[in-house]
Amino acid sequence: MKKNAAAALGALALLGFLGAVAVSDAVPISFHGNQSGETAQPLFTPSHPAGTTLRTIDGGAAFYAQFANPLPVSEDYFPVGVWFESALEKDYVAKDAAAGLNVYVVLTPDSDLELVRNSHMYAIPTFPAARASGFALGDEVDMWAGGGDAIWTGKYPGEGPICEPEQAKCGHTVQRRLNAEAPSGVMKYANYGKGVTFWLGDDQARSFINDYQDVASADNYWFTDPNICAKSEGGALNGHLRDLTEEECRLAANYGWTVERVRELAGKDSPVWAFVEVGHPFEDAPSAGTITGPQIRAAVWSSLIHGARGIVYFNHSFGGTCVTQHVLRDCPGDARPAVTAVNRQIKELAPVFNAPFLDGAVTSTGPVDHATKLHDGKLYILSAANKHAGGQAEFHTSCGGSSAVVIDENRTLSVTDGKFTDTFADGNAVHLYRIEGGGSCGF
């Protein structure tokens, strides 16, 4: 859990993003919805290869357009946010933009939203504001207030008793009250934590994810949390039968698992966003760590492959060598370069992320997760290792092709009989492919 001091300052969060994923040796998820709440029907005819379906992104491409002062819905925009920053000085806001950030998800109350908008950025604060593109509800209320409907005292962690009676649970009351305070017509966002992902039953978790906000997320910090490998937490990956080993737990693919957990709860009808830490988000402890640049990149890509429609960086360090509320502004090391580089890729590939998924068009064998997108008549295969040691993977596309251009790696692989292989060096390995010389499977 994030340090209580941060929860007490605002204790609020952000929103969600979705898409389908094919996990190696698993059946691709294919159900989706659109912004009207109606079930999106796969565009399939017998002329397409068997088992292939074209599916829109979760919530639909125009999801944000339904709200007041919305986030952009152009194909070249993808939400990349930073959590609980201040926007007071032009130079700092410019530094954030230079790292590829485009939305502030929760801001300090003294932030200048006019400066934010004049800097071509967006804001989702916890307070009503004319220039805001959303309103953030309570952050991690599933953890600090629990899954119940008791009276909320109005207090946050560290301020005194939260619920009445004191031992009762009142998380749903918190979100209902904050939801009622949101300005009319704005997009509402909330971030949740280990209650939704690990501890609560599906009915309680589903209520948190679906009943109060338009976009949701959950934060599980797999690389740095000193407690997450325990049977009662990350043990959710094996049915809470045992603790996870370090190799099972400290794995980028688990960030994708968290996104999938929230997507399943949301019914894949609205965007789910992903949280990735960029520093040392816990006080110093034997099992607490500082995330590395390669881990940041891999966690982001696992989230995107598993359908996240937005990324939010947790920008606070409570331990390690750079204790700060502004990691991306203040800290030396590889976090800012890694975030800047992956954000550049996200910006360049935004039209691909906003394009439909082509489920069933590509299968893979080996230690990888992958998702397939169809944009401008070309197949894009987004892939990342899902085992600590990595390994070799084989991909097979039913849409044909003569080569696979490995994006941003200055190499091209031959495609023979619809197949190509590649090596994933370790659990942080990510490869992105554009298939050339093939078709679109008739779509």
Image (cartoon, rainbow, N blue to C red):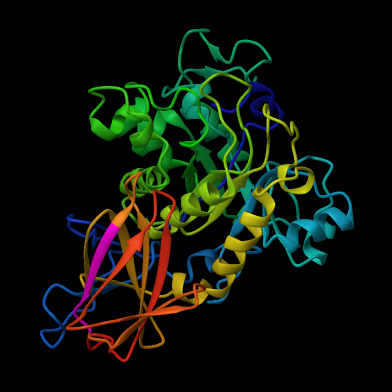
> What residue is at 60 percent from the left and 47 percent from the top?
313
x, y (%) of residue 397?
22, 77
Q: Quadrant of residue 174?
A: top right
Q: Quadrant of residue 434?
A: bottom left
Q: Is 416 situated above or below 139?
A: below
Residue 354 in sight from this viewpoint: no
Q: Is 218 situated above or below 296?
A: above
Q: Quadrant of residue 318?
A: top right
Residue 410 in sight from this viewpoint: yes
x, y (%) of residue 168?
46, 12
Please say whether residue 84 is one of the residues in the magenta stretch. Answer: no
- Prevailing secondary structure of the magenta residues: strand
Q: How many labels sit on residues?
A: 0
Q: Is 18 situated above or below 288?
A: below
Query: Which residues are the magenta region?
Result: 392-399
- From the viewer's side, name the closer residue of 400 and 9: 400
Quarter of the figure with the C terminus:
bottom left
> What residue is at 55 percent from the left and 47 percent from the top?
189
Please say whether residue 395 is one of the residues in the magenta stretch. Answer: yes
- Extreme bottom residue here? 437
x, y (%) of residue 425?
39, 55
x, y (%) of residue 6?
68, 29
> What residue is at 63 percent from the left and 24 percent from the top?
3
- From the viewer's side, name the closer residue of 104 and 40: 104
- From the viewer's side, name the closer residue of 215 and 342: 342
